[in-house]
Amino acid sequence: MLLEGFVIEQEPLRAYLSANIKARRESLKISQEKLAELAEVSVQMIKGIEGQRTWVSDKMLTSLAHVLGVSAFQLLIPSDGAVLTNDYALISGLLHNLRQNIHDDIENRFAPFFTERQLKNN
């Protein structure tokens, strides 16, 4: 599997969450104050999340997603509004895993052929 063993670090998740909440909030034309009121959290909490200084609980993530009209997972993945410098690390990790998977697949498929050929030559 391409993503097997690959973990997205906390920093990109914070950045995705921040960018996605802010982008969605702005597309809905609501202020941080209004989002805080609707999600029943403090304005400072919203500012902290959008500023990547505060993390959220699962309950808060669900509440924010509901108010913003999206699924919770959508707040944690890259979107057009979440362009990050850390995307390079994510792509590099995925590319490394892909290369390893291709290498392993080739080894597994052709190993019997090479083993059989070596036995015939000896």
Image: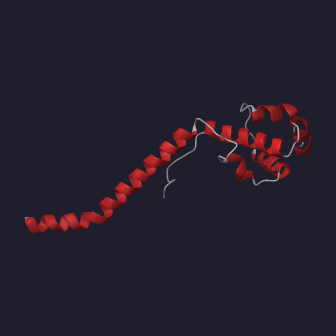
Relative to 37, residue 62 above or below: below
x 82%, y 41%: residue: 26
x 78%, y 39%: residue: 22
x 67%, y 37%: residue: 15
Between 4 and 2, the one lying in front of the other is 2
Residue 57, image quadrant: top right
Between 83 and 77, the one lying in front of the other is 83
In x, y percent, where is residue 92? 48, 43
In x, y percent, where is residue 12? 62, 39
Relative to 68, residue 34 above or below: above
Residue 23, image quadrant: top right
Relative to 120, 107 lies left or right: right
| Color scheme of the displayed model | secondary structure
Relative to 65, 95 lies left or right: left
Relative to 57, 13 lies left or right: left
Q: How many marks?
A: 0
Q: Looking at the figure, which quarter contains the C terminus?
A: bottom left
Between 122 and 82, the one lying in front of the other is 82
In x, y percent, where is residue 76? 68, 46
Relative to 64, 38 lies left or right: right
